[in-house]
Amino acid sequence: MTDTPLPPGYIPAEDMLRLMYSRGITDTEVARLTGVNQSTITRLRQGTQKKASADLYFRICAVYRSRFPEDTAGAYHD
C-alpha cells in the first residue's frame, strides 16, 4: 500500500465511513467487502487511526459507490 496524498476536495475516508454507518452499513460489512480487518475500519471511522492509505481509501470508495451510486459526494473519479 502506498502513502500517496489524495487530491484536494476528496472526502476523507473516515467521513465516508461515518456516512455509510449512518445509512446502515456496518463496519463488519465494509471490512468484508474491502478485505480489510474490521478493527482497522472501526479505528478509521472513530478517528483513532489517523489516515488511510490510498489503496484503502479507494477500496472504501468502491464500496460507497456500489451502495450509493446516486451520491457522488464521496466518490473518486476514474
Image (cartoon, helix red, strand yellow):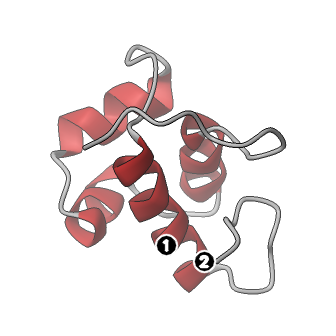
Position in image of residue 31 (x %, y %): 26, 57
Secondary element at image label 1:
helix
Q: Residue 65's mark?
A: 2
Look at mark 1 in the image and give the residue it sits on.
62
Q: Are marks 1 and 2 in contact (CB under 8 Å)?
A: yes
**Percent of width and height locating residue 56:** 36, 49
Q: Is residue 56 left or right of residue 78?
A: left
Q: CA distance from mark 1 to mark 2?
A: 5 Å
The C terminus: image quadrant: bottom right
Left or right: where does residue 67 sit relative to residue 49? Answer: right
* The one of 23 and 70 positioned closer to us in this rendering: 70
- Which quadrant of the structure image shows residue 29? bottom left
Q: Is residue 67 above or below residue 6?
A: below
**Residue drawn at 47 percent across, 50 percent down:** 57
Q: Badge 1, how many Cα within 10 Å: few under 14, some, many 20+?
A: some
- The amino acid type of the residue labelled 1 equals Ala
